[in-house]
Amino acid sequence: MPTFQRTTWIDAPLDTVWQFHERPDVLQLLTPPWQPIEVLRRDRGLDVGSRSEFRLWIGPVPLRWCALHTVCEITPTQRHFIDTQTEGPFLHWTHRHQFDAHRDRQTRLTDTIDWELPGGPVPNALGSGWITAELDRLFTHRHQTTQRHCTQPQPPRSPDPIRADI
């Protein structure tokens, strides 16, 4: 079974990177502009039992893709969650999202995907190069987006109103 992996150091603490991934709009933020994917549903954040549903387009053909979160573990220095395709184009798809703290200032983000196309070894051999290239392009975008959102300076707080006693 083919495996894809991308690791990036994010210049932000673990809590910041994890909270970004908990955002209700994170799937829209992480979807690259060139990908014809519509987020139809996302519920319960990253918790076990959470479901996400997408519509993607392969040429003019719409395809439904559903994923179920099967694992979500949180410790002070590590966090991860796993989603598994329950309906979609792959025979098998398991995506592990791993977050590791480094000295409270950085987070190592690793996405690992085990996948398999239907139809046996021939389609997998023929599609492997293209799928790996597309995953590389997708996760380069996702990790850059995560870096950008997690390291942007927060807007300054409004100053307290000045009180003048008359």
Image (cartoon, helix red, strand yellow):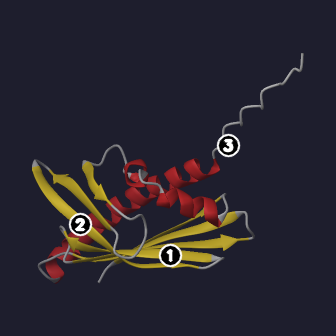
Residue at disc 2, secondary structure: strand
Residue 120 or residue 69, whichever sits in front? 69
Foreground pick, 22 / 60: 22
Of label 1 and label 2, which has the lower sequence position?
Answer: 2
Expressed as whole percent of the image width and height from the top left, the position of residue 163 reads 84, 24
The residue at 60%/52% (across/down) is 150
Disc 1 versus disc 3: distance between alpha carbons?
Answer: 25 Å
Say left or right for 68 vs 72.
left
Q: Is residue 4 above or below residue 136?
A: below
Crowd class of label 3 (few under 14; some 14 to 19; many from 20; radius 10 Å): few
Could you tell me which quadrant the C terminus lies in? Answer: top right
- Quadrant hosting residue 86: bottom left
Q: Residue furthest right?
A: 166
Q: Secondary structure at mark 3?
A: loop
Amino acid on which the number 1 mark rests in the picture: His
Q: Counting residues from the N terminus, which is met first, the one under dot 2 or under dot 3?
A: 2
The residue wearing badge 3 is 153
Q: Earlier in the sequence, mark 1 or mark 3?
A: 1
Secondary structure at numbered mark 1:
strand
Q: Residue 125's spot in the image, x, y percent?
A: 22, 76
User: Residue at (55%, 64%) from the top-left corner?
Assistant: 18
Label 2 environment density (alpha carbons within 10 Å; few <14, some 14–19, many ≥20): some
**Front in this rendered view, residue 44 or 101:** 44
What residue is disc 1 on?
Answer: 80
Query: In the rendered structure, which amino acid carries the disc numbered 3?
Result: Pro
Q: Which residue is under mark 2? A: 66
Name which residue type carries label 2.
Answer: Cys
x%, y% of residue 79? 55, 75
Label 1 to label 2, Cα distance in Å? 19 Å
